[in-house]
């Protein structure tokens, strides 16, 4: 799955670098969002069941909803209220993602389409979780409205800022972890995912650090949690306590001073990632929340490429099985939109490294022709001055 996902993200990044078109006379962003939610809610019960998704009688509805999402995501990208650099990257990713689903459906690759469509809520979440301190749920859920496992329901709710309900469900997954689960690989990955999603809610979105420490204390009372995960949870607590000491100062940082914090806290390149970034997840979530907040608050002008670079670092480091990775998309934006900046060469170097990782196998690196060509063009842009 991880490999498919990496390929998906990689493909999404190089296949279609369409630029935002001029905004049509646009309805409020909310109207577009409400329609996307209606489409996603209609698709949700089909997505969580292979049999329902494959059934021919549902095909017309699936096609109709995907076409609707595709049209609306074009308008989301072009919408004037969604032009901050962070939103633009997410909006483009959503758009490319839906186009891929649409192509897969047309070419009859239905199981791939289902898998890709099921990860659409992560693209929604990549915008909605860009560090909003007091997020409101984006819609009111009725009991029993969503289908699927608790994890599938929680992930959907997470994507639309229904953080309270999602948080409760993730918490049940952590606290309900049993002795038998400890030797079950899927149960362990559900546990890790639940822990990380919740950490994102507390640290990046709500910035409620004491609540995070307290909840982890409660979790640790479950004696069945695997010892490796307990060690990680305790390390997170220690890091969060450190963070609490200067969280007020950090939140007041702007511009260059915030970038200085990012340079200090984040690995300078993906070559410096240690054990994924589990070791440093707290800092990554914290700093990325601050960076997103600033990009939304005001344009960062010449500093934007560096913001994008650090957001790429955070995203590349986040475990791809847990988070929808926009890392490569940030790097691409950094090169394409700011070709003459001091950072574009650095963004390119990292992008090339990621592409190599994607295509390297036991026989060395084997780039398809169009990828080679794409890299060549990007390199020219990045080095254009
Ligand atoms: C480009 C960024 C972006 C993407 C991608 C995105 N959203 Fe949104 N969404 C927003 C913003 C910004 C708001 C406004 C949030 C607020 O007002 O608090 C919003 C609000 C919403 C709302 C509330 C609308 C209302 O009536 O108040 C819903 C529902 C919603 N989004 C659903 C979705 C769904 C479903 C997806 C994915 C298919 C999605 N969004 C993808 C940025 C995005």
Image (cartoon, helix red, strand yellow):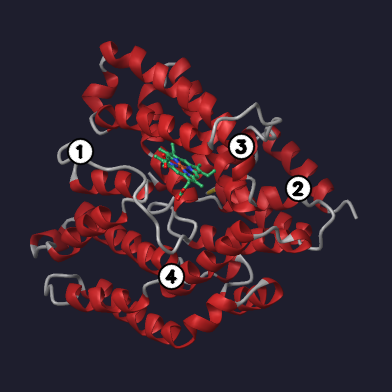
Return the x and y of residue 207 as percentages of the image width and height.
41, 70
**Some atom of ligand 1 lies within 8 Å of the CB belonging to the residue at label 4:** no
Picture layout, residue 180 above or below residue 5: below
The Cα atoms of the two marked residues, 2 and 3, are separated by 18 Å
Q: Is residue 364 visible?
A: no
Give the label, 1 or 3, closer to the camera.
Answer: 3
- The crowd level at tag 4 (other Cα within 10 Å; few <14, some 14-19, many 20+) is many
Circle nearer the viewer, 2 or 3: 3
Task: Identify the disc placed on residue 337.
Answer: 2
Q: Is mark 3 within 8 Å of ligand 1?
A: yes
The answer to whether the residues at label 4 and label 3 have Cβ atoms under 8 Å apart is: no
Look at the image and tell me in which quarter the N terminus lies: top left
Q: Secondary structure at mark 4?
A: helix
Cα–Cα span, label 4 and label 3: 32 Å
How many C-alpha atoms fall within 10 Å of the one at disc 3: few (<14), some, or many (≥20)? many
Earlier in the chain: of badge 4 and badge 1, it is 1
Quickly name the residue at label 3. 79
Instruction: State the residue at coordinates (57%, 71%).
Output: 272
> Is 45 or 112 nearer to us in this picture?
45
Going from N to C along the chain, the mark reached first, 1 or 3, is 3
Q: Is residue 225 visible?
A: yes
Q: Quadrant of the C terminus?
A: bottom right
Closer to viewer: mark 4 or mark 2: 2
Q: Which residue lies under the disc numbered 1?
A: 148
Q: CA distance from mark 1 to mark 2?
A: 40 Å
- Left-right relation of 325 to 385: left
Which residue is rendered at x = 61% and y = 73% of the image? 262
């Amino acid at each position: 799955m991880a490999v498919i996902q990496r390929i998906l993200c990689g493909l999404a990044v190089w296949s279609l670098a369409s630029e935002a078109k001029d905004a049509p006379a646009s309805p409020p962003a909310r109207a577009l969002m409400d329609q996307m939610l209606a489409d996603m809610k209609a698709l949700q019960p089909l997505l969580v069941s292979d049999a329902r998704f494959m059934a021919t009688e549902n095909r017309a509805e699936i096609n109709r909803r995907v076409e609707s999402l595709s049209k609306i995501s074009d308008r989301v990208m072009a919408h004037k209220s969604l032009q901050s650099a962070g939103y633009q990257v997410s909006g483009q990713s959503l758009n490319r993602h839906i186009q891929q689903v649409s192509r897969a459906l047309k070419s009859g690759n239905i199981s791939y389409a289902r898998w890709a469509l099921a990860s659409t809520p992560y693209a929604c979440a990549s915008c909605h979780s860009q560090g909003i301190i007091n997020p409101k749920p984006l819609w009111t859920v009725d009991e029993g409205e969503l289908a699927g496992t608790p994890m599938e329901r929680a992930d959907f709710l997470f994507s639309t800022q229904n953080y309270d309900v999602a948080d409760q469900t993730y918490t049940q997954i952590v606290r309900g972890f049993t002795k038998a689960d400890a030797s079950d690989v899927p149960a362990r990955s559900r546990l890790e995912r639940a822990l990380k999603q919740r950490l994102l809610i507390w640290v990046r979105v709500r910035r409620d650090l004491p609540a995070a420490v307290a909840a982890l204390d409660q979790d640790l009372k479950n004696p069945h949690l695997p010892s490796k995960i307990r060690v990680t949870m305790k390390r997170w607590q220690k890091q969060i306590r450190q963070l609490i000491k200067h969280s007020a100062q950090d939140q007041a940082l702007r511009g260059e001073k915030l970038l200085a914090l990012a340079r200090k806290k984040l690995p300078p390149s993906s070559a410096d990632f240690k054990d994924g970034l589990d070791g440093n997840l707290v800092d990554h979530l914290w700093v990325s929340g601050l960076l997103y907040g600033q990009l939304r608050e005001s344009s960062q002008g010449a500093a934007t490429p560096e913001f994008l670079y650090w957001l790429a670092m955070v995203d590349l480091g986040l475990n791809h099985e847990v988070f929808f990775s926009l890392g490569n998309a940030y790097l691409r934006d950094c090169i394409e939109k700011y070709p003459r900046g001091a950072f574009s060469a650095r963004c390119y170097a990292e992008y090339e490294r990621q592409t190599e990782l994607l295509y390297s196998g036991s026989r060395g690196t084997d780039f398809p022709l169009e990828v080679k060509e794409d890299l060549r063009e990007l390199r020219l842009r990045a080095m254009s001055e």
